[in-house]
Structure formats: structure tokens, C-alpha cells
Image (tube, rainbow, N blue to C red):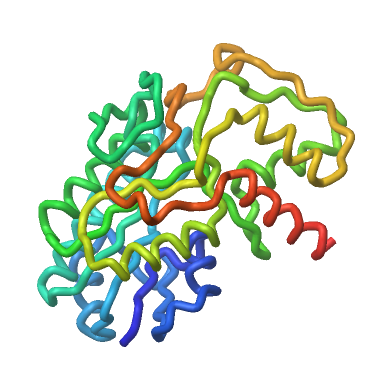
Amino acid sequence: MSIMITGSGGQLGLAFQQADLQSGKIPLPISQLDVTSLADVRQVIEAFSPSLVINCAGYTKVDQAENEPDLAWRVNAVGPRNMAIATAERAIPLVHISTDYVFDGRAERPYHEFDSTGPLSVYGRSKLAGEHAVVTHNPRHYIVRTAWLYHHEPGQSSNFPLTMLRLAVHGQVRVVSDQYGSPTYAPHLVEAVKALVGTGAFGTYHLAGSGGTSWYELTRRLYAHMDLAVTVTPVATTEFIRPAKRPRYSILRTIQSPEITLPPWEEGLLQFTARLKNEG
């Protein structure tokens, strides 16, 4: 048995590579597989004949997607469609990673799997289209919506906590305090996905760090854990003009898999910072 991991060069793909999956791993970074080409995807699936495919490939530059909509749609919508078609042709289950940005953020409580979607950005709309494509083309699917994902590996620097640590050298930062979500430590998500696949219950699931917080509180806790004396000033979203709109509130919870939940987001941050300290 073997598990193919597409988008294996990203932070989640690397976390899957490092995990004990109890099967052989076939890591395929974007440089080795063009998910936007159905012919290429079919060729790779045929050549390796995996028992499971975990699709971590995605266009994740939320703001840049507003200026590169065609690329975002090809990677986030056409790519999952191709993966679903090629895996369905061989009755291979497909795990597809999606996002909390498929919601509009108007909720007054955490979103569950049956809540109505309403993405606000090109990124969110393209990811939702990818979900629909997977559902349409491969009934043997696990769609996993997660949120505020982060990890730390050599060469990985494009996540929020690492960005905040780089900015700490200035001694003060201004951080949005009125956007709320579920920070998710990538190794915790990997373990939840493993458990989910073990159930054999196909469907759409919310798997993110339990509970929720704001970008401001996440930053404040991050600096405290790293023993950094940085002044963190809370500011409103309206003070940061960004090309893409973000959901104001996108904390996730699950009613599909109450037996499979991630640890509280605070535990993920503690493990993340402890690792950074050990490496430092």
C-alpha cells in the first residue's frame, strides 16, 4: 500500500511526509506534478497506483489571487477536478484540503460542515469550486476544511507565526484584532486526517485547532511563549487595506466527526514554539 501526497513541498505536505502513515509515501511537489493537467495527473496515478491520494496542492496567496485569478482557479478548482477524475477512474479514495475562507464570516457561532458557504475572495471562491469538483467526480472523498495553518520546517516561512517572529525585531507590531479563526498546527491536522481516513466515512469535515482566537491574541501568545518583549497593538481590519476580503469570523467546529478533534489551538502553539526554542 502507498499514499501519494501532492503538493508535498508545502508546510502541510511536509508534515504528512514526516508522519508515520503506516504505508509507503509518494511525495509529489508541484514541480513534479502539474495538477492543472488532467493528462499528467492520469499518468502519475496510473504509474504509481496509490491506495490513497492526499491532495495538499493549492494556490494559497490570498491577496495575490485577486490579481492572478486564472492561476488561482486552475490550481484550486481545475486541479482538484483532475485529481478527483483520475482517482475515481481507479476507485482510489481522495483526501482534499480546503479552507475556512469558503465562509463569509457573518456567523455568530463556529461554523460546522452543513453551514451555508459564501466566500468573499477569489481564493475562497476557487477553493469552494474545488470542493464541488471533488464531490462531483469522486464519491470516495474526504474534504477537509482547516484554518490558519502553520508549521515550521527549513525553507518554510510563509505562515503567520513565522512572519510575526520576523517582525519582532522592530519591537512593536500592529495586528488585526477583529478577525477570529482556529489556528491549526500542521502535525495535529495530520493526525486527525489519519484518524478520519481510518473511519472510511467519506464526506466533508472541519478539522482545525479546537477553539478560536484573533490574530492579535495569537500574536500576543506567540511572543509570550518565545520570551520576546514586543509591544502588540490591536487594530481594526479597516486600518489594513488588503486586496482580498477576509471572513471576520471563521472559527470551525465539527458535527460530522465529534470523535475526531484536534487539540486546543493553544497546545499547537506551545508545541510550535517549543520546537523553535529547541532549534534556536
Q: How far across and down, in percent of the image, does residue 17 sit?
A: 50, 73
- Closer-to-camera residue (140/82): 140
Left or right: 124 in relation to 280: left
Q: Quadrant of residue 201 in the image?
A: bottom left
Indicate whether 170 appears above or below 143: above
In this rendering, the answer to whether 266 lies above or below 238 is: below
Q: Quadrant of the C terminus?
A: bottom right
Q: Is residue 209 left or right of residue 90?
A: right
151 relative to 49 in the view: left or right: right
Could you tell whether 77 is left or right of 212 in the image?
left
State the residue at coordinates (76%, 43%): 165
- Residue 186: percent from left, percent from top: 53, 57
Q: Which picture quadrant has residue 172?
A: top right
The image quarter in which residue 240 lies? top right
Residue at horizontal 34 percent and vertical 84 percent from the top: 2
Q: Position of residue 156 (x, y in %)?
A: 62, 58
Count of numbered circles in the view: 0
> In the rendered image, is residue 75 in sight?
no
* 153 relative to 259, above or below: below
Extreme residue in the front direction: 259
Query: In the rendering, at what x and y percent does residue 244 appear?
Result: 44, 27
Residue 189 in sight: yes
Q: Residue at x 38, y 43 (%)?
A: 99
Please give the name of the residue rendered at 23% of the width and 29% of the height, measured from the top-left corner. Answer: 116
Q: In this view of the protein, which residue sits in the foreground, 79 or 228?
A: 228
Q: Name the image quarter holding the N terminus.
A: bottom left
